[in-house]
């Protein structure tokens, strides 16, 4: 099918005509353990598993489209795919452009710097420091709001991996990132042994209640079907089974 077909009437009609039902998800696979590529090039991660489970519940085929993170919302609005499933935080600012499903999960944001560093999340300690963040992320928004006015130099990168590379190389003093992602992608690896989680930062207006699936404004049918599927996979144990593949804590949050 050329467009998303999720209403029960539409699905029934498509089935009667023998058409294959499809849901096209946009994602940026540079954010393990939520979305990344395996050594063989296959998409993997918790978001990918959740998307496939949602598609299975809705009896549709998942089609995954890669896109840079900061370009996901423009691409969604341009109808390059039907929804965004890429650790996208539910924020008031993003709600101006798109709608969101119910929460998928919630993880904390942390300042990351060298072990033994005197830096903290207090803006005064970051004056004159170089802070790397992923472009288009809530971490960039937080750093620009809280740290740049105090004199920190906030540097935006197209991917988290590029941030980590400059942090390890000494071109950055710190980064702000998802604690789960940075632990797996940097801190647990040999190149990250000299760095640690320094301090959690919080701002409800920026980080929102967690992540969700982004859909185009006004697409109420799609949104309702996604919410119904999310509720179903949480109720039948699928969500918890998938989460245990990646996490030893409650990833859903409060």
Image (spheres, rainbow, N blue to C red):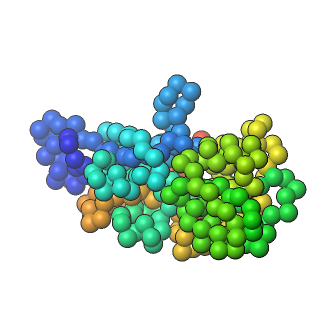
Q: Residue at x 56, y 66 (%)?
A: 141
Give the percent coordinates (x, y) of residue 43.
Answer: 48, 35
In which quadrant of the rendered view does residue 128 lie? bottom right
Residue 93 to residue 61: above or below: below
Q: Is residue 57 left or right of residue 138?
A: left
- Answer whether residue 250 is visible to the viewer in this image: no
Q: Is residue 142 left or right of residue 55?
A: right
How many numbered discs? 0
Residue 103 to residue 66: above or below: below
Q: Residue at x 34, y 58 (%)?
A: 215
Give the percent coordinates (x, y) of residue 42.
Answer: 48, 30
Comparing 182 with 63, the one in front is 182
Farthest-out residue, top: 40
The quadrant of the picture occupied by the N terminus is: top left
The quadrant of the picture occupied by the C terminus is: bottom right
Give the percent coordinates (x, y) of residue 173.
Answer: 75, 55
Residue 51 to residue 198: above or below: above
Comparing 8 with 122, the one in front is 122
- Answer whether residue 16 is visible to the viewer in this image: yes
Farthest-out residue, right: 116
Q: Residue at x 46, y 54 (%)?
A: 70
Comparing 150 with 24, the one in front is 150
Give the percent coordinates (x, y) of residue 201.
Answer: 68, 68
Residue 124 to residue 84: above or below: below
Q: Residue at x 48, y 68 (%)?
A: 91
């Amino acid at each position: 099918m050329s467009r998303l077909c999720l209403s029960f009437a539409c699905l029934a009609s498509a089935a009667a005509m023998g058409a294959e039902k499809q849901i096209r998800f946009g994602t940026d696979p540079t954010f393990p353990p939520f979305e990344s590529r395996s050594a063989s090039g296959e998409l993997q991660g918790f978001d990918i598993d959740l998307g496939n489970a949602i598609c299975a519940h809705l009896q549709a085929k998942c089609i995954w489209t890669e896109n840079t993170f900061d370009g996901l919302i423009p691409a969604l609005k341009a109808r390059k795919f039907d929804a965004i499933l890429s650790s996208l935080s539910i924020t008031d600012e993003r709600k101006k452009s798109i709608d969101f499903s119910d929460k998928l999960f919630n993880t904390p944001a942390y300042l990351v710097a060298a072990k033994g560093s005197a830096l903290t999340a207090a803006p005064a300690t970051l004056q004159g420091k170089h802070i790397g963040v992923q472009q288009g992320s809530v971490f960039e928004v937080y750093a620009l709001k809280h740290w740049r006015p105090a004199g920190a130099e906030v540097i935006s990168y197209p991917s988290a991996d590029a941030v980590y590379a400059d942090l390890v190389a000494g071109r950055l003093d710190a980064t702000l990132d998802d604690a789960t992602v940075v632990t797996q992608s940097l801190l647990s690896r040999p190149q990250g042994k000299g760095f640690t989680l320094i301090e959690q930062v919080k701002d409800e207006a920026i980080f929102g209640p967690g992540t969700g699936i982004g859909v185009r404004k006004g697409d109420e049918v799609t949104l309702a079907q996604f919410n119904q599927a999310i509720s179903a996979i949480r109720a039948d144990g699928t969500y918890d089974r998938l989460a245990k593949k990646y996490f030893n804590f409650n990833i859903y949050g409060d």
